[in-house]
Image: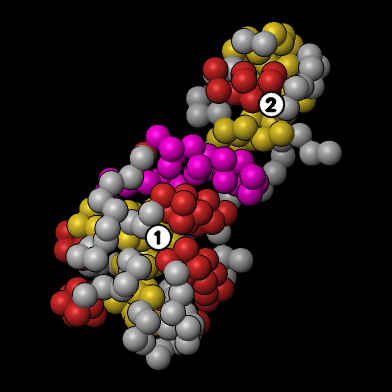
Amino acid sequence: MNNIRLFYPNSIVENSTSLLSKEHTHYVANVMRLKRGSKINFFNETGEWLSEIIFLEKDRVEVRFLKKIERELNESTNTELAICLVKKTPMEFILQKATELGVSKIIPIISERTEIKDLNYERAQKILIEATEQSNQLKPPEISKVIKLKDFMENIKGNIKLFFADINSKNKLKNDDSKNNDLKIILIGPEGDFSPSERELILSNPSTTPFSISKNILRSDTAVISAISLVNFINKNH
């Protein structure tokens, strides 16, 4: 069985020791019921480290970082997700699956038809970290502050490619729609789609490439998986 992977945001020095956080202590001692001598992998964007539990009680766990594991470092992707906020359960699913599919940043957006206006950032960050641990990546995606669609579109300029998942579009994504040096942002609308004036705003931007995901109308969480997978395919991030 592979070792448990846990995200460790601080710097790691070989042969040093560390007391685990309260959350990690509970997980290791009470959820997974590991023992002294058990091995754990800790990781952050600098790499992954094989570690050993050297002290364990119900409310205190200390580990020693044994050695850095030789592995290929994940290159930071140039794909971001801009997603109009949806209700709690589908939003959490979106955060999880977008992380697993390798986006480097998630931008929560408020549009005219967005019913949800805020995001629990503490909960969101926990989901991103857990999805990073599960998917064998080293760096959780960044998550930005909630932004209004108009303000978001004002920042779409220069070396940015905006892939707009448009239910009214008949265009299919093609390999030449992607240039690897471009920052790619995938835009997914709210349940009920963007308003006509918002669609006009999005489509009027010269950086926008509208594309069709499916002939069917998809829920936001399904659309996210489909859209990221399509962009990853033409961008060769798969």
Q: Which of 67 and 25 is in front in this view?
A: 25
Q: Where is residue 187 in the image (x, y as percent from the top left)?
A: 35, 67
User: Quadrant of the image for the C terminus?
Assistant: bottom right
Q: What element carries label 2?
A: helix
10 shown above or below 93? above
Q: Which of marks 1 and 2 is nearer the N terminus?
A: 2
Q: Which mark is residue 26?
A: none
Image quadrant where residue 31 sits:
top right
Residue 139 forms part of the magenta stretch: yes
Task: Report crowding for label 2: few under 14, some 14 to 19, many 20 or more residues within 10 A (C-alpha).
Answer: few
Instruction: Report, in whole angstroms, how far the alpha carbon at label 1 lies from the one at label 2.
Output: 33 Å
Q: Which residue is drawn at 57% across and 33% down?
A: 7
Q: What stretch is highlighted in magenta?
A: 122-146
Looking at the rendered structure, the kind of residue marked 1 is Leu
Image quadrant where residue 185 sits:
bottom left
Q: Position of residue 75 (x, y in %)?
A: 54, 53
- Residue 53 visible (yes or no): yes
Q: Where is residue 23 in the image (x, y as percent from the top left)?
A: 55, 23
Q: Nearer the viewer, residue 25 or 45?
A: 25
Q: What element carries label 1?
A: strand
- Residue 173 visible (yes or no): no
Residue 120 forms part of the magenta stretch: no
Q: Is residue 144 left or right of residue 19?
A: left
Q: Is residue 101 left or right of residue 32?
A: left
Q: Mark 1 points at which residue?
A: 81
Q: Mark 2 points at which residue?
A: 31
Number of the front mark, 1 or 2: 2
129 shown above or below 24? below
Image quadrant where residue 39 sits:
top right
